Image (spheres, rainbow, N blue to C red):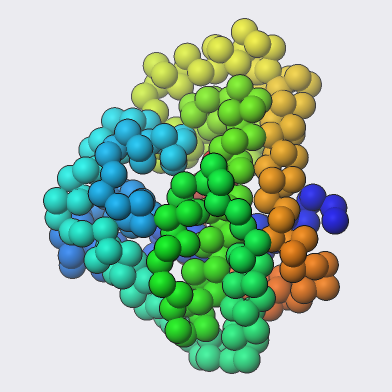
Amino acid sequence: MDPTISRQMYRTLEPYHAMIYFVPEASSAYERIGLPGRRMGYFASRAAPLGAVSAEVVTAIFYNFHPALVRSVIPAAWQRAKPAQISATRLEAVDAALRRILGASLDTPDVAEAANLAREASTACPSEGRPLLAATATLPWPDAPHLALWHAVTLLREFRFGGHCAALMTEGIDACEALVTHAATGEVPARALQTSRAWPDGEWAAAGQRLRERGWLTPDNTLTEEGQARRAAAEQRTDQLALPPWEHLGEAACKRLRELVRPLSKAITEAGTFPVSLSPWED
């Protein structure tokens, strides 16, 4: 199977998962249980399956956020709400947001079929070296098909994410450099990546200087041929590492799953869920 199919699956499925980081239902739900602010809700809800871990653990696993940003909300979040309560609240917010955006289209045989296919794919996601996937996989499966689909897509997403971090490390790309090289591709504005991950100007500039010294970045912050090759190698390796669930599912079922989820993801995106300046994709 062509490894790029894993990227195609990711691009189609990701909006269905990633909407939870942007919808107002999430912020409201987290505030109700004592987690104020979007950042505390994000870190606490995504890390909750790991248990009440330290800021250092979350920083290491999430890879590209500045440590001070993580420390500003973790472990304080665990003193406000228990991880299990946070996970349950997150799922409630998922339900509310999907029902608002997608309405009656959720209660269809197509969504149930998509949930079954995605769940089957997720059974072929080995957890070795992927602690966030392993922890998320311990959460109970929701009964409602649209929530089971969301949970399956989340597992598939965290599986790919773990491989992506491994690929970045293999290429010698550290946390801030991952963002600088991403910005240098032109896909997402540098300012959006820098501010959302809270990297100070000095550390951002230092990462750029390191990349220029390696010959990866030009003076005007675009990728050199070497930089393009290194970034491409990381993306290709990510695709390869994310392939097992799609090989397990098979090409025909992968195509069918994309057909089923594409209109859902399109509707989520067209509803204005994601900020124009900030991609919901990896990095």
Q: In the rendered image of this protein, does residue 98 appear above or below residue 153?
A: below
Q: Quadrant of the C terminus?
A: top right
Front position in the image: 43 or 85: 85
Residue sitting at 18 percent across and 59 percent down?
81
The picture places residue 187, in percent across and down from the top left corner, at 63, 41
Q: In the rendered image of this protein, does residue 97 appear above or below residue 70?
A: below
Residue sitting at 21 percent across and 50 percent down?
77
Q: Is residue 220 visible?
A: no
Q: Is residue 173 visible?
A: yes
Q: Quadrant of the N terminus?
A: bottom right
Residue sitting at 74 percent across and 68 percent down?
249
The picture places residue 4, in percent across and down from the top left corner, at 79, 51
State which quadrant residue 74 falls in: top left
Left-right relation of 250 to 31: right
Front position in the image: 9 or 276: 9
Count of numbered marks: 0
Left-right relation of 186 to 192: right
State which quadrant residue 31 falls in: bottom left
Q: In the rendered image of this protein, does residue 257 appear above or below residue 185?
A: below
Front position in the image: 246 or 99: 246
Front position in the image: 254 or 271: 254
Left-right relation of 247 to 188: right
The picture places residue 125, in percent across and down from the top left corner, at 62, 57
Q: In the rendered image of this protein, does residue 185 appear above or below residue 224?
A: below
Identity of the residue furthest to the right in this view: 1
Residue sitting at 74 percent across and 32 percent down?
233
Identity of the residue furthest to the top in this view: 213
State which quadrant residue 209 falls in: top right
